[in-house]
Image: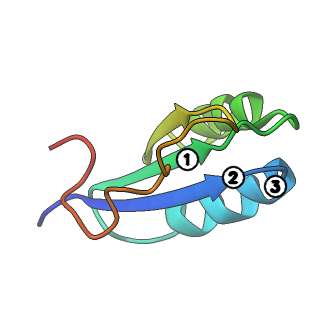
Amino acid sequence: MPRTSVLVRCYRQAEYLPESIGSVAAQEHPDLEVVVVDDGSPDGVREAVVALAQKNPQVNLRLLRRTRDSPAPSTPACGRPSASE
C-alpha cells in the first residue's frame, strides 16, 4: 500500500496540532506521513511538532518552515505523491 501524506498548514494554531496529529495517528493505515507547514507562526509550532513526534512514533512527522514574507505558496504539492518520494 502506498504512503499516505497529510499536509497540515499552521499559522498561530499550534494548540490544535495535538488533536490533528492524534487523529492521523489513530488511523490504521500502515504508512502515514504528516507534513506540518509552519507558515512563520510565532506560537511554538516547532516545539509542538517535536513533542508530538516523540508521542506518535508510528507516524512519520515532518516539519517544513517558511517565513511569512516568502513569495512561494507553502502548498504546491497538494495532490501529488508523498513528500518522501
Marks 3 and 1, how far apart at CA = 11 Å
Verify CB contact (< 8 Å) between mark 3 and mark 1: no
Viewer-proximal residue among 12 and 34? 12
Q: Name the image quarter holding residue 18.
A: bottom right
Marks 1 and 2, how far apart at CA = 7 Å
Residue at image position (56%, 58%) is 8
Amino acid at pointer 2? Cys
Q: Residues within 10 Å of mark 3 (few under 14, many from 20)?
A: some
Indicate how the structure is coloured in the image.
rainbow
Q: Name the image quarter holding residue 21.
A: bottom right
Query: Residue 6: x and y, percent?
Result: 43, 62
Residue at image position (27%, 45%) is 83
Amino acid at pointer 3? Gln
Image position of 67 (left or right of 28) = right
Image position of 42 (left or right of 4) = right
Verify CB contact (< 8 Å) between mark 1 and mark 2: yes
Image position of 18 (left or right of 52) = right
Instruction: First in sequence, mark 3 or 1: give its number.
Output: 3
* SS at circle 2: strand
Q: Which residue is mark 1?
A: 36
Q: Which residue is mark 3?
A: 13
Query: Residue 75: x and y, percent?
Result: 44, 56
Q: Which residue is mark 2?
A: 10
Amino acid at pointer 1? Val
* SS at circle 3: loop
Marks 3 and 2, how far apart at CA = 6 Å
* SS at circle 1: strand
